[in-house]
Image (tube, helix red, strand yellow):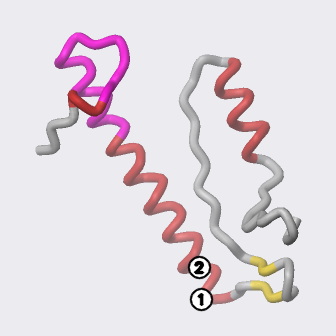
Amino acid sequence: MTRQGVLNFEMEASALLVLAGLGGCRAGVVCAVYANRRTGEFVAGAGKDRAEAAAVETGLESLLILAELDRQKSMAGAVRWRPSLWAPE
């Protein structure tokens, strides 16, 4: 994987995204990196706690952004959101 330039691999996200798509739902994934597979180093303790907190914060912020995009789409009577609808408050 190193030769191919892979920087991250994750095992469960693809299943989540496929199932959400099949069910007509939006889904996203935020990855917190705990291991350097090339060196065998792992993050633990406070570093792991910070990574988890950052992942949760990122996910929650994305929900706020999606809600705002949905609001703008609805106000415009559009079927899909597009950049020309963006009007940050």
Q: Residue furthest left?
A: 89
Left or right? Give the position of 83 relative to 4: left
Graded by Cα atoms within 10 Å as few (under 14), some (14 to 19) or many (20 or more), the crowding at tag 2 reads: few
Q: Is residue 71 magenta?
A: yes
Magenta includes 9?
no
Tag 2 near tag 1, CB within 8 Å:
yes
Instruction: Please identify the quadrant where the N terminus is shown.
Output: bottom right
Q: Which residue is mark 2?
A: 49
Q: Amino acid at mark 1?
A: Ala
Residue 25 image point, x, y percent: 57, 24
Q: Amino acid at mark 2?
A: Asp
Q: Which residue is mark 1?
A: 46
Q: Where is residue 78 shown, x and y percent of the image?
A: 28, 13
**Which residue occupies 78% across, 64% down?**
6
Q: Is residue 28 above or below residue 61?
A: above
Give the main secondary structure, helix, strand or loop, of the magenta stretch: helix
